[in-house]
Image: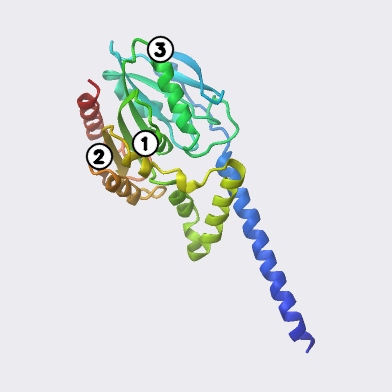
Amino acid sequence: MAMINLLPKQLVLTLLIIVIIVIVFSLFNFYMSINPGKWPMHFTPQSFNLEYENVTFETSDNLKLKGWFIHGNNTNKTIIVMHGYPTNKADVLPFSMFLLKKYNVFLFDFRSFGESEGIYTTAGYEEVKDLDAAVKYLGSRKESKNIGVLGFSLGGAVALMNRNDGIKAIIVDSTYSGLNNVIESMYRHFYFLKYPFVYLTRLYSKLFFGIDPKDVSPANGIKNTDKPVLIIHAKKDTQIPVKEAHILHDANKKAELWIVENADHGETYALNRKEYEKRVFEFFERHLQ
C-alpha cells in the first residue's frame, strides 16, 4: 500500500526533473546561440598582399562595425561579401578574392562578430541594419556606384531580408529559408522530443528580444524582392539541408538555382572553383550595369 502511495509522488518528481532539465538545457543552448564567442582572425588582406583600407562605420542603432575595403581592378562596382555564423570577415576573405579580378570587395563583421561591436546575434533579424549601414558607407565612395551582394549562410539570409535599393543583385550560398527551420534542424536528433526545445527557444526569443523566429524569414524576403537572385547550395549540406534552397526557389521562381553535387556546407566553392567563378561573374555582369 505504501508503494502505491509513493508512485504518484515519484512520477511527479521525475516529470519535474525532466521539465527542469529541458528548460535549463534549452536556455543554455539559446544563450550559446546568441553569444557564440569570437572566432580568431587568422589573416587580413595584408596577408595576401592586397591593397585595402580598414573601415569603421555605424549602424542606425549606434553600433560600430569593422570592415575591409579591398581595391579591385579600376572599377566602380563593389561586391559586399558577408560571412556566416559564427565566423567573421576573415573566414570569407580567401573565398572572395577571385572577385577582385573585376570588382572591389567589401567585407565586414556583423554585430557581435569579429571586430564589430555588439553583445549578441539575432541570426539575421537585426543584422539587416548592418547591411544597410554597409551600403550607406559604400554610397559615400566613388568606387562603389554599383553594388552587388554575395552572402554565405547567415550573410545570405541577411541579403534576402534586406530592402535597400542600393543593392542591385544578390547571390546567396548555403542559406536557410527561415530561422525556425534552423532551430528545428538544431534539435533534429531529438526526433519527436525536439518540439519542447523548439517551443522554448521561440519563447526565449520573444521574451528577450521581442522577436519570433518565424518572422526571420529569408523565404518571405526573396518572395517580395524585385532584385535578381542566384541561389547556390550544396546538395549534401549537413548543416542547412538542401531543401532550404528549394523552399527559397519555390518562393521566387525567377531566382536562379544551382545545386552543387557532392558538396557539404562550405564546400561549394572549394570543390568547384572554375564553375563557381564562371557563374558568379556571369550573374553580376548581367545585373551590375
According to the picture, the residue beneath numbered tag 1 turns out to be: 160
Q: Earlier in the sequence, mark 1 or mark 3?
A: 3
Q: Which residue is mark 2?
A: 255
Query: Which quadrant, please, contains the N terminus?
Result: bottom right
Lower sequence index among marks 3 and 2: 3
User: Three-letter amino acid code at disc 1?
Assistant: Leu
Answer few, some or many: residues within 10 Å of disc 3's Cα (few below 14, many 20 plus, some between 14 and 19): few
Q: CA distance from mark 3 to mark 2?
A: 30 Å
Q: Quadrant of residue 267?
A: top left
x%, y% of residue 53?
A: 44, 13
* Residue 9 at least partly seen: yes
Query: Percent position (x, y) of residue 284?
Result: 25, 26
Q: Residues within 10 Å of mark 2 (few under 14, many from 20)?
A: some
Instruction: Tell me the distance, in whole angstroms, between the alpha carbons under discs 1 and 3.
Output: 23 Å
The kind of secondary structure element at disc 2 is loop
Residue position for label 3? 140
Specify whether 121 is left or right of 223.
right
The location of residue 272, given as percent across then percent down, is 26, 37
Mark 2–mark 1 Cα distance, whole angstroms, equals 11 Å
